[in-house]
Image (cartoon, rainbow, N blue to C red):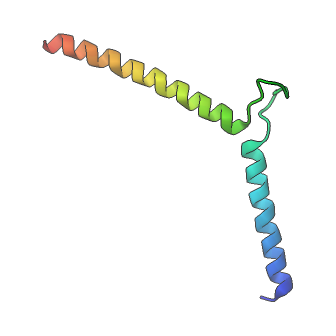
């Protein structure tokens, strides 16, 4: 592959990486640009933390119930 081919491949790879970065760090839908701004990544991380906390609470309740039955 010559210089032109390498340039085209590099351009395509750079455009793809740029699109992924813009998607992850760009604004989420219906987001206002103020103090409450969140990118898609920020929103996904917050939702993951919330799901983790809910699941941990559920597991603690199940553990306490199982402990009562055996004890």
x, y (%) of residue 5? 82, 82
Q: For this view, does 22 lie left or right of residue 44?
A: right
Q: Tell which residue pokes out farthest to the front in this image.
A: 35
How many numbered markers are drawn? 0
Q: Place residue 26 in its image quadrant.
A: top right
Q: In which quarter of the image is residue 16?
A: bottom right
Locate residue 42 relative to residue 27 in the image: left or right: left
Q: Which residue is drawn at 78% across and 56% down?
A: 18
Q: In which quarter of the image is the N terminus?
A: bottom right
| Residue at the extreme left of the image, as rendered | 71
Please state the horizontal and vertical placement of residue 39, each as a whole percent of the image: 74, 36
Specify the farthest residue to the bottom.
Answer: 2
Front in this rendered view, residue 49 or 70: 49
Q: Identify the residue shown where x is 81% and y is 89%.
A: 2
Q: Which residue is rendered at x = 74% and y = 51% of the image?
A: 21
x then y, percent, for residue 54: 47, 21
Q: Which residue is drawn at 76% across and 67% down?
A: 13
From the top left corner, tell me how far across and down residue 7 is, in percent.
83, 78
Name the image quarter holding residue 27. top right
Q: In this view, does 35 lie above or below 25?
A: above
Position above or below: 22 against 39: below
Q: Which quadrant does the C terminus fall into?
A: top left
């Amino acid at each position: 592959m010559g210089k032109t081919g390498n340039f085209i491949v590099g351009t395509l790879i750079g455009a793809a990486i740029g699109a992924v970065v813009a998607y992850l760090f760009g604004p989420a839908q219906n987001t206002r640009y103020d103090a409450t701004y969140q990118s898609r990544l920020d929103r996904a991380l917050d939702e993951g933390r919330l799901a983790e906390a809910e699941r941990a609470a559920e597991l603690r309740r199940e553990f306490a119930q199982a402990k009562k039955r055996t004890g």
